[in-house]
Image (cartoon, grey):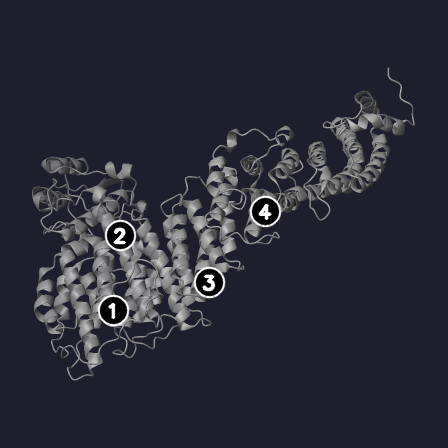
Amino acid sequence: MLCIPKANHKRLVDDCYPTSKALVNAAPEYRPNANELGRLVYYAQCKPAKLSKVGRLLMTRASSESRAFMTANTEKNKALVMITLGVLRDLVSSCQEGHAYLAPAVRSMLTDAVNVAAPTGSAMTSWDMDICARASSIFAMYVQSIPAGEVDTDDAVSSAVFQGLSDLQRLGKGHASDQSRMIWIAGINGLIRSPVLMTPLFPRFLPLILPIVLDTLSPAHIPLSQTATLSQEIDNDPAQSLNSMSHSSAEQSTRAALKMLWSILHRCDATQLRALLTQTLAYLDGECHRPSTWEDNEWPLWILAVLIQWSLPSSRYVVPHCLVNALTTPKKMSNIRETRLLQALHVILESKTDIVGLNMTELLDGHVFFLLSRVQNDPYDATTVQATIDAICHLANYTVYSDQLDDFVQQIAPHILNVLYDTQLADESKKFSICALLSCLEALFRSHPNAHVPLRTWASTEAILASRNSTVRVAYLHTLLVHLRIEQALLEQGHTTYEPVNECIGFLHALAARMYTLATLGLVDDAATPTSDVTPSFSATPADYAMMHDMLDTLLIVAPAASLLAFVPPWLSMAQVSNSPGALEPVVVNQTLAIRWLVGATLAQISLVWQIQPILDYVRVYQLPSIGRAVPEAPTLPDKYHPLNDMPPFKHAAFAAASENEWDLPLIIEHLSLQVELQTSTHADAPSLRAWFSRPWSVPATAADARTAAQPTITRSSTFTKAFRSASPLTRENSMDVRKLRMALMNHSSNAGTIPASLMNEKSSPIPSTPMHRRHHSRSIHTHEAQQSVSDVLDRYTSKASRRAPLSPNVAAGSGSPREKVPLQTAAATKAAPAHGLAPTIAEREAAQWLAAQRNTGQTLVVSQ
C-alpha cells in the first residue's frame, strides 16, 4: 500500500510541475506530471481536510505566477499558470466531497486566471483562450459537485460560485468574439446542469447569465431569420464541448446560446419563469447596461414567444400575466414598448401553443386598466387602443367554457360604471374611456359570433343612458344592438332559444325606465326620477331616438314576451306625453314627433312579431302618417375604436306641426290583452294582461319591478283553456262530477284539430324546465287514442255513485277516506305547419314549456272514495 508522509502536501504539489526545461515545451496541453498528480489526489481523497492546506498553497503559487506572467508574457510563465490551474482542476473533479475546503482556492484562482487572460495595454490584445478555457472548465466541474442546499448555507461556497460567475461574465460582455462566448457558455453549462441553479438563489443567477445569452441571440450578433431557423433544430443539438471552440462561428455560438436557454426554460417552475421573464423585460427596457431593444422590430416579439413555447406547459400562464403587468408599468419609450407588448400578447394568444391555468379575471383587468390609462393619456392614439382591444379578443379565445364570455361582459361592465360615476375625470376623458370599453365589448361579440350571451349579463349597464354625452349613449345602444343582432342570427340558425321571461325581464324593466327618462327629458317634469345619483341636465338627440328604435326592433325578436311586458307600459305612458298641442317651440315639436314616431314604430314591430293586425292598421293609418319628415336617422358608427364627435341636436325649425291625433290607448291595450299567444307565453289571462298594461306606470315603480323581476300574475286555469281556443267547461272549482270531467276531456279529444301544431312539442320549449329524459317520457296521448285512454283512466277511479273532487290535494288526511292521485292527461295534436308567421311559433313553444312544467310538477286530481 502506498505510504504518504504526514506533512508532505507541499512536496506533493511541487512534484506535479515539470522541470524548467520541460515547461518550455508543455504547450499546448500544459499537463502536470501524471504520477505525482495521482499521489496528490490520493492524499486529498484520504484526508479531505488537508485540501484546505493544499488550496492555500495553490492560491499562493497562482498569485505569484500570475504576477510573473503579467510582467513577462513568456511561454514558461504561461505554462506555470496553466499547470497550477490543471492541478486545481483535477482536485476539483476527483475530490468532490472536499468542495467546501477548496472554495477559497477556486474563488481566488479563477479571479487571477481571468485577470491574467484579459487583454492588456493600449493595443487591447485578445483574450488568452487557453487560460480562459481552463478556468471555465474548473468552474463547470466545481458547481456540478456542490449539493443544492450548500450554496445557501455555506458562505465560502456561495462566494466562490457567484465570484466565479462574475469573473467569467467578462468573457461574454460587449463585443466579445464567438470563441470567448463559447468558452463562457461551456462554463455556464456546468451551472445549468447542476442542482445549484434551481434553488431560491435562481433570481441572483439570472443577471449574471441571461443578458449575455440575449446578446448572443440579438440581431446585433446574427440576423433574426437565421436565429429562428436554428431555434427549430435546437432539440437535437448536443451539448457544446471545449474541444470544438478553436474555430467558433456566430452560428455555433447562437446555437449554443439557444440550447442553454432551452435547458433553463425546461427546468423552470412558475416562480422561476416569472423571475426569468422579469429579467428579460428589464433587458428589453435597457436596464442591464445596454440600450433598449424594443425598436428591433420583430425580435422582442420572437424572444417573448420563445419563452412561452419552450417553458413547461404548467408554467406558461406566467408569461401573459407578466406581460399584462408590464403594460401598467410606465417606462421610457412607453409608446413603442406598449405596442410591442400588445403585439407579443397577440402572437402568444394566437399561436398554437397550449396555455393552461390562465387567470382570466386578472388578465382582463390588466388589459382594461392599460386600455383606460392609454385612452385617458391620449384618446386619439387609436392604434394602441385598438391593439389592446384586439388583445382582449384574443384572450377570449382561451375561454374554456361557453359562459366565460358572459363573465367578460360582466367584468367589463363595472369598469364602465366606475368611469361614469368618477367625479375626478373630465367629461372628455369619460367620453373616450366609456366609448373604448364599449368598443371592446362590441369587438368581443363580433369575434365570437357563435357564443350565446344572455341579456341578464347587461344588468346595471343601462345607467350609461344617464350620461350627459350623446356619443356615449349612442355608442351604448349601438353595442347592445350588435349583441342583439348576433343573438337573432343564432336564433335563426337554431343555435339558441328565445330569452326566458324570468331571466331577462329585470334588466329590461331597468332599461325601459332609462329609455323613457331619456326620451322624455324636457317634456315631463319628473322624467329624471332618481334611479341613480346622476341627475340628467341634457336633452335627447335624434340619434338617441333612432338607436333606441333599432335596438328595440331587434330586442322584440330576441326576447319577444319579456320585452313586450317591460316596454309596453312605459311606451303607453310616453304616448300620452306626445299628445301635446301644436303651438310649441320647434325643438319641442321635433322631440314630440320623435317620441310619437318611436312609440308608433315600436307598436308596429310588436304587431308584426305577435301578428296583431288591428294595432298595426291603427298605427299605420292614424299615427305614423302624422309624423311627417321627423323620422330620425341612425348614425353610422365604425366597427373599431375611433374618437367620435358629439351627436347633433334637434334643429330649431320644426319638421312638421305637432300632431293633434291622440293615442287610442284602450284599443291598443285591449288587442294586446286578447292575444292568445301572448297569454300563453306570459302564463297570464286577458284580465291580468289588461291590468298590467293599464296600471299607473312610473320610473320609481319600475325600479322596484327591476329588482323583483315583476311579471303579470300567473293564472294557470285560464291560460290552460285559452291555449286550446275552446269553450271547455274544465275549470278549477270546489267540486266536479267525474262524469262531467270525462265529457270535458272527451270534448277536447274530439276537437283536437284546433290545438296549435307545436303546442305539445317539448323540443321547441324556450324554457326547458325539466331534464330531457323526463320530458321525453312525459305522458301524452295521440288524437286517435284520446277517447279510449280518457275512458280507461276515469273508469279505474270511478264508482257507481259520482264522486266529488276536493278543493285541494292538501286537505286533511284525517277524514279517513282513502285518496288516489290521477294524472290529468291531455290530447296531443298531430304535427302541422303554423298558420302564420313568427308569433304562433313563439306562443306555441312557450305553451309547450308550461304544459311540460305542469306534468313534471305532478299536478293531480284527488278523488275521494
The Cα–Cα distance between marks 3 and 4, rounded to whole angstroms, is: 26 Å
Is 144 or 33 nearer to us in this picture? 33
Label 1 or label 3, whichever lies nearer to me, is 3
Label 4 or label 1, whichever lies nearer to me, is 4
The Cα–Cα distance between marks 1 and 3, rounded to whole angstroms, is: 29 Å
User: Callout 4: 10 Å neighbours few (<14), some, many (20+)?
Assistant: some
The residue where tag 3 is placed is 373
Looking at the rendered structure, which numbered label has been put on residue 275? 4
Dot 2 amino acid type? Ile
Residue drawn 47% across the image and 47% down it: 301
Sequence-earlier tag: 4 or 2: 4
Looking at the rendered structure, which numbered label has been put on residue 543? 1
Residue drawn 85% across the image and 38% down it: 60
Q: Secondary structure at mark 1?
A: helix
- Residue 743 location in percent, x, y? 10, 44
The Cα–Cα distance between marks 2 and 3, rounded to whole angstroms, is: 30 Å
- Residue 729 location in percent, x, y? 12, 51
Q: Secondary structure at mark 3?
A: helix
Is 520 or 375 nearer to us in this picture? 375
Q: Secondary structure at mark 4?
A: helix
Dot 4 amino acid type? Ala
